Image (cartoon, rainbow, N blue to C red):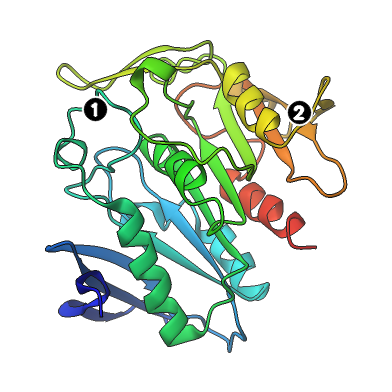
Amino acid sequence: MPKWLTVSCLFAVLIVSSARAQLISDSLLVDGRYRSFHYNTPSQSLRRPGLVFVLHGSGGNGKGMMKSAEKMEQQANADNALVVYPDGYKRYWNECRKLSPAEANQLDVNEQAFFDAMLAYFKQRYRINPAHVFAVGTSGGGHMAYKLALTMPKTFRAITAIIANLPDTTNLDCTPSGKPVAMMIVNGTLDPINPYNGGPVILGKNMNMGEVRSTERTLAYWAGLARYQGKPALETLPDVDPGDGKTIERYTYKEQGKPEIVLLKVIGGKHDYPNDIDVHLEAWRFFQRQIQ
Protein backbone atom coordinates (compact mmCIF):
# COMPACT_ATOMS: atom_id res chain seq x y z
CA MET A 1 0.00 0.00 0.00
CA PRO A 2 1.43 3.43 -0.91
CA LYS A 3 2.50 5.39 2.14
CA TRP A 4 0.23 8.32 1.22
CA LEU A 5 -2.80 6.10 1.74
CA THR A 6 -1.89 5.54 5.39
CA VAL A 7 -4.64 7.04 7.51
CA SER A 8 -3.40 8.83 10.59
CA CYS A 9 -5.29 8.77 13.82
CA LEU A 10 -3.29 11.75 15.02
CA PHE A 11 -5.88 14.19 13.70
CA ALA A 12 -8.87 11.96 14.23
CA VAL A 13 -10.96 14.40 16.23
CA LEU A 14 -14.68 13.99 16.41
CA ILE A 15 -16.60 17.13 17.38
CA VAL A 16 -20.34 17.29 17.80
CA SER A 17 -21.51 20.34 15.84
CA SER A 18 -25.26 19.81 15.81
CA ALA A 19 -27.93 17.28 16.64
CA ARG A 20 -27.98 16.17 13.03
CA ALA A 21 -24.34 16.19 11.94
CA GLN A 22 -20.86 15.77 13.33
CA LEU A 23 -17.74 17.62 12.29
CA ILE A 24 -14.85 15.26 11.65
CA SER A 25 -11.24 16.39 11.31
CA ASP A 26 -8.80 13.79 10.07
CA SER A 27 -5.45 13.53 8.33
CA LEU A 28 -3.54 11.36 5.89
CA LEU A 29 0.17 10.70 5.69
CA VAL A 30 1.23 11.91 2.25
CA ASP A 31 4.90 11.71 1.27
CA GLY A 32 5.95 11.94 4.90
CA ARG A 33 3.67 14.87 5.79
CA TYR A 34 0.35 14.75 7.61
CA ARG A 35 -2.29 16.51 5.51
CA SER A 36 -5.53 17.41 7.23
CA PHE A 37 -9.13 17.88 6.11
CA HIS A 38 -12.57 18.41 7.62
CA TYR A 39 -16.12 17.38 6.81
CA ASN A 40 -19.56 17.13 8.36
CA THR A 41 -21.04 13.69 8.46
CA PRO A 42 -24.24 13.79 6.38
CA SER A 43 -27.46 14.13 8.34
CA GLN A 44 -29.12 11.64 6.01
CA SER A 45 -28.11 8.41 4.36
CA LEU A 46 -26.22 8.94 1.10
CA ARG A 47 -25.97 6.33 -1.64
CA ARG A 48 -22.85 6.46 -3.81
CA PRO A 49 -22.65 10.20 -3.15
CA GLY A 50 -20.79 12.79 -5.14
CA LEU A 51 -17.86 14.58 -3.51
CA VAL A 52 -17.12 18.32 -3.46
CA PHE A 53 -13.82 19.79 -2.29
CA VAL A 54 -14.03 23.39 -1.03
CA LEU A 55 -10.58 25.01 -1.15
CA HIS A 56 -9.54 27.94 1.03
CA GLY A 57 -7.48 30.93 -0.05
CA SER A 58 -3.82 31.65 0.70
CA GLY A 59 -3.25 31.92 4.45
CA GLY A 60 -6.59 30.31 5.29
CA ASN A 61 -7.76 26.87 6.36
CA GLY A 62 -10.51 24.39 5.61
CA LYS A 63 -12.68 25.12 8.64
CA GLY A 64 -12.65 28.80 7.72
CA MET A 65 -14.54 27.99 4.51
CA MET A 66 -17.43 26.20 6.18
CA LYS A 67 -19.56 29.27 6.90
CA SER A 68 -19.43 30.66 3.36
CA ALA A 69 -20.25 27.25 1.87
CA GLU A 70 -23.01 26.41 4.37
CA LYS A 71 -25.95 26.77 1.95
CA MET A 72 -24.11 24.87 -0.73
CA GLU A 73 -23.38 22.03 1.66
CA GLN A 74 -27.03 21.81 2.70
CA GLN A 75 -28.11 21.61 -0.94
CA ALA A 76 -25.33 19.17 -1.83
CA ASN A 77 -26.37 16.85 0.99
CA ALA A 78 -29.96 17.01 -0.22
CA ASP A 79 -28.71 16.16 -3.71
CA ASN A 80 -26.66 13.19 -2.49
CA ALA A 81 -23.17 14.66 -2.18
CA LEU A 82 -20.58 15.02 0.57
CA VAL A 83 -18.57 18.24 1.04
CA VAL A 84 -14.94 18.23 2.21
CA TYR A 85 -12.76 21.14 3.37
CA PRO A 86 -9.04 20.31 3.02
CA ASP A 87 -6.19 22.30 4.54
CA GLY A 88 -3.31 23.56 2.44
CA TYR A 89 0.21 22.81 3.61
CA LYS A 90 0.95 25.39 6.33
CA ARG A 91 -2.08 27.38 5.07
CA TYR A 92 -0.94 27.52 1.43
CA TRP A 93 -1.30 25.31 -1.64
CA ASN A 94 1.38 24.15 -4.02
CA GLU A 95 -0.56 25.45 -7.01
CA CYS A 96 0.78 26.39 -10.43
CA ARG A 97 2.35 29.79 -9.75
CA LYS A 98 6.10 29.32 -10.21
CA LEU A 99 7.03 32.46 -8.26
CA SER A 100 4.96 31.71 -5.16
CA PRO A 101 7.19 32.04 -2.07
CA ALA A 102 4.88 29.76 -0.03
CA GLU A 103 6.65 26.82 1.60
CA ALA A 104 4.22 24.43 -0.10
CA ASN A 105 5.54 25.62 -3.45
CA GLN A 106 9.18 25.79 -2.40
CA LEU A 107 9.03 22.18 -1.16
CA ASP A 108 6.97 21.10 -4.18
CA VAL A 109 4.39 19.44 -1.92
CA ASN A 110 2.57 16.68 -3.78
CA GLU A 111 -1.01 17.98 -3.93
CA GLN A 112 -2.18 15.40 -6.46
CA ALA A 113 -1.20 12.62 -4.07
CA PHE A 114 -3.11 14.40 -1.28
CA PHE A 115 -6.30 14.56 -3.34
CA ASP A 116 -5.86 10.97 -4.51
CA ALA A 117 -5.49 9.92 -0.87
CA MET A 118 -8.64 11.80 0.17
CA LEU A 119 -10.55 10.20 -2.70
CA ALA A 120 -9.43 6.75 -1.52
CA TYR A 121 -10.46 7.65 2.04
CA PHE A 122 -13.98 8.68 1.02
CA LYS A 123 -14.39 5.77 -1.38
CA GLN A 124 -13.66 3.42 1.50
CA ARG A 125 -15.94 5.13 4.02
CA TYR A 126 -18.82 6.41 1.90
CA ARG A 127 -18.47 4.59 -1.42
CA ILE A 128 -18.49 7.87 -3.29
CA ASN A 129 -19.25 7.96 -6.99
CA PRO A 130 -15.88 8.61 -8.69
CA ALA A 131 -17.68 10.11 -11.71
CA HIS A 132 -19.16 12.88 -9.54
CA VAL A 133 -16.11 14.58 -8.02
CA PHE A 134 -15.87 18.40 -8.04
CA ALA A 135 -13.80 21.25 -6.59
CA VAL A 136 -14.49 24.91 -5.88
CA GLY A 137 -11.77 27.25 -4.66
CA THR A 138 -11.40 30.90 -3.70
CA SER A 139 -8.32 33.02 -4.50
CA GLY A 140 -5.33 30.76 -3.78
CA GLY A 141 -7.86 27.95 -3.56
CA GLY A 142 -9.02 28.95 -7.02
CA HIS A 143 -5.45 28.51 -8.21
CA MET A 144 -5.39 25.08 -6.59
CA ALA A 145 -8.66 24.28 -8.35
CA TYR A 146 -7.06 25.26 -11.66
CA LYS A 147 -4.17 22.90 -10.88
CA LEU A 148 -6.61 20.03 -10.36
CA ALA A 149 -8.23 20.82 -13.70
CA LEU A 150 -4.88 21.13 -15.47
CA THR A 151 -3.28 17.98 -14.06
CA MET A 152 -6.17 15.68 -12.98
CA PRO A 153 -8.92 16.23 -15.58
CA LYS A 154 -10.05 12.60 -15.51
CA THR A 155 -10.63 12.81 -11.75
CA PHE A 156 -12.69 16.02 -11.61
CA ARG A 157 -16.00 16.31 -13.44
CA ALA A 158 -16.13 20.09 -13.04
CA ILE A 159 -14.24 22.93 -11.35
CA THR A 160 -15.13 26.42 -10.12
CA ALA A 161 -12.43 29.05 -9.55
CA ILE A 162 -13.42 32.22 -7.67
CA ILE A 163 -11.37 35.46 -7.82
CA ALA A 164 -8.48 33.70 -9.57
CA ASN A 165 -6.94 33.81 -13.05
CA LEU A 166 -4.60 31.26 -14.57
CA PRO A 167 -0.90 32.02 -14.08
CA ASP A 168 0.73 33.73 -17.04
CA THR A 169 2.73 31.36 -19.24
CA THR A 170 5.99 32.70 -17.76
CA ASN A 171 4.69 31.98 -14.23
CA LEU A 172 3.28 28.49 -14.85
CA ASP A 173 5.12 25.52 -13.38
CA CYS A 174 2.46 22.83 -13.93
CA THR A 175 2.41 20.57 -16.97
CA PRO A 176 -1.12 20.89 -18.40
CA SER A 177 -2.77 17.74 -19.67
CA GLY A 178 -4.43 19.59 -22.53
CA LYS A 179 -7.73 17.87 -21.72
CA PRO A 180 -10.98 19.89 -21.42
CA VAL A 181 -12.79 20.22 -18.10
CA ALA A 182 -16.12 21.89 -17.28
CA MET A 183 -15.09 25.21 -15.75
CA MET A 184 -16.82 28.15 -14.09
CA ILE A 185 -14.86 31.34 -13.29
CA VAL A 186 -16.13 34.09 -10.96
CA ASN A 187 -14.03 37.28 -11.11
CA GLY A 188 -14.50 40.94 -10.20
CA THR A 189 -13.53 43.72 -12.59
CA LEU A 190 -12.10 45.92 -9.81
CA ASP A 191 -10.17 43.20 -7.98
CA PRO A 192 -6.93 44.80 -6.67
CA ILE A 193 -5.29 41.44 -5.87
CA ASN A 194 -6.33 39.20 -8.77
CA PRO A 195 -6.35 41.81 -11.56
CA TYR A 196 -9.20 41.20 -13.98
CA ASN A 197 -7.04 42.32 -16.90
CA GLY A 198 -4.01 40.34 -15.75
CA GLY A 199 -0.76 41.35 -14.09
CA PRO A 200 1.11 40.74 -10.81
CA VAL A 201 -0.60 39.27 -7.75
CA ILE A 202 0.76 40.84 -4.55
CA LEU A 203 -0.22 39.48 -1.13
CA GLY A 204 1.16 41.80 1.52
CA LYS A 205 4.74 43.09 1.55
CA ASN A 206 6.65 39.90 0.84
CA MET A 207 4.21 37.74 -1.13
CA ASN A 208 4.68 38.44 -4.82
CA MET A 209 2.95 35.48 -6.49
CA GLY A 210 3.97 36.47 -10.03
CA GLU A 211 1.76 37.44 -12.93
CA VAL A 212 -1.58 35.99 -13.95
CA ARG A 213 -3.39 36.07 -17.28
CA SER A 214 -6.42 38.24 -17.81
CA THR A 215 -9.84 36.80 -17.07
CA GLU A 216 -10.63 36.90 -20.81
CA ARG A 217 -7.49 34.88 -21.60
CA THR A 218 -8.30 32.46 -18.79
CA LEU A 219 -11.80 31.94 -20.16
CA ALA A 220 -10.43 31.54 -23.68
CA TYR A 221 -7.98 28.87 -22.50
CA TRP A 222 -10.69 26.60 -21.11
CA ALA A 223 -13.06 27.32 -24.00
CA GLY A 224 -10.28 26.48 -26.45
CA LEU A 225 -9.59 23.12 -24.79
CA ALA A 226 -13.28 22.30 -25.21
CA ARG A 227 -13.09 23.38 -28.88
CA TYR A 228 -15.58 26.20 -28.66
CA GLN A 229 -15.54 28.89 -31.30
CA GLY A 230 -17.15 32.30 -31.52
CA LYS A 231 -18.57 34.32 -28.65
CA PRO A 232 -20.28 32.91 -25.57
CA ALA A 233 -23.96 33.53 -24.83
CA LEU A 234 -24.49 36.57 -22.58
CA GLU A 235 -27.03 36.88 -19.77
CA THR A 236 -27.34 39.71 -17.25
CA LEU A 237 -28.28 38.39 -13.81
CA PRO A 238 -30.85 40.16 -11.63
CA ASP A 239 -29.36 42.92 -9.48
CA VAL A 240 -30.69 41.55 -6.21
CA ASP A 241 -28.66 43.98 -4.07
CA PRO A 242 -28.38 47.33 -5.89
CA GLY A 243 -26.64 48.81 -2.86
CA ASP A 244 -23.51 46.70 -3.21
CA GLY A 245 -22.42 48.49 -6.38
CA LYS A 246 -21.99 45.25 -8.30
CA THR A 247 -23.78 43.63 -11.23
CA ILE A 248 -23.12 40.25 -12.80
CA GLU A 249 -22.94 39.14 -16.41
CA ARG A 250 -22.89 35.43 -17.22
CA TYR A 251 -21.00 34.31 -20.32
CA THR A 252 -21.66 30.69 -21.30
CA TYR A 253 -20.25 28.23 -23.79
CA LYS A 254 -22.50 25.19 -23.92
CA GLU A 255 -23.01 22.59 -26.62
CA GLN A 256 -24.11 18.97 -26.60
CA GLY A 257 -21.20 16.65 -25.94
CA LYS A 258 -18.85 19.37 -24.67
CA PRO A 259 -18.03 20.48 -21.13
CA GLU A 260 -19.76 23.71 -20.15
CA ILE A 261 -17.50 26.76 -19.76
CA VAL A 262 -18.85 29.77 -17.83
CA LEU A 263 -17.64 33.17 -16.70
CA LEU A 264 -19.51 35.17 -14.07
CA LYS A 265 -18.15 38.68 -14.62
CA VAL A 266 -18.80 40.70 -11.46
CA ILE A 267 -18.80 44.30 -12.66
CA GLY A 268 -17.54 46.44 -9.78
CA GLY A 269 -16.49 43.36 -7.85
CA LYS A 270 -13.29 43.34 -5.81
CA HIS A 271 -11.45 40.48 -4.09
CA ASP A 272 -14.65 39.34 -2.44
CA TYR A 273 -17.99 37.63 -3.02
CA PRO A 274 -20.90 39.47 -4.67
CA ASN A 275 -24.14 39.82 -2.74
CA ASP A 276 -26.40 39.10 -5.71
CA ILE A 277 -25.61 35.39 -5.67
CA ASP A 278 -24.23 32.79 -3.29
CA VAL A 279 -21.11 31.83 -5.23
CA HIS A 280 -20.78 28.38 -3.66
CA LEU A 281 -24.43 27.58 -4.26
CA GLU A 282 -23.98 28.79 -7.84
CA ALA A 283 -20.97 26.46 -8.13
CA TRP A 284 -23.07 23.53 -6.94
CA ARG A 285 -25.76 24.28 -9.52
CA PHE A 286 -23.04 24.40 -12.16
CA PHE A 287 -21.70 21.04 -10.98
CA GLN A 288 -25.16 19.50 -11.07
CA ARG A 289 -25.66 20.58 -14.68
CA GLN A 290 -22.62 18.54 -15.68
CA ILE A 291 -24.19 15.26 -14.55
CA GLN A 292 -27.75 15.78 -15.78
Disc number lying in front (1 or 2): 1
Q: Residues within 10 Å of mark 2 (few under 14, many from 20)?
A: many
Q: Is residue 15 visible?
A: yes
The percent position of residue 95, horizontal first and vertical second, equals 33, 38
Horizontal placement of 231 versus 91: left or right? Answer: right
Q: Of the residues shown, which amino acid type is indicated by label 1? A: Ser
The percent position of residue 21, horizontal first and vertical second, equals 44, 81
Where on the picture, by quarter, is residue 57? top left
213 relative to 28, above or below: above
Mark 1 lies on a secondary structure that is: loop
Q: Of the residues shown, which amino acid type is indicated by label 2? A: Tyr
| Closer-to-camera residue (246/182) | 182
Q: Is residue 40 visible?
A: no
- According to the picture, the residue beneath numbered tag 1 turns out to be 100
Where on the picture, by quarter, is residue 94? top left
| Image quarter hosting the N terminus | bottom left
Query: At 69% from the left edge and 28% from the top edge, which residue is drawn?
Result: 224
Mark 1 or 2, nearer chain start = 1
234 relative to 68, above or below: above
| Image quarter hosting the C terminus | bottom right
Query: At 64% from the left edge and 55% from the top edge, which residue is drawn?
Result: 284
Residue 32's tag is none
115 relative to 278, above or below: below
- According to the picture, the residue beneath numbered tag 2 turns out to be 251
171 relative to 68, above or below: above
| Closer-to-camera residue (77/36) | 36
Query: At 65% from the left edge and 23% from the top edge, which residue is drawn?
Result: 220
Query: At 38% from the left edge and 19% from the top edge, which residue is drawn?
Result: 193
Mark 2 lies on a secondary structure that is: strand
Determine whether label 1 and label 2 are within 8 Å by CB: no
Between the C-alphas of marks 1 and 2, the distance is 30 Å
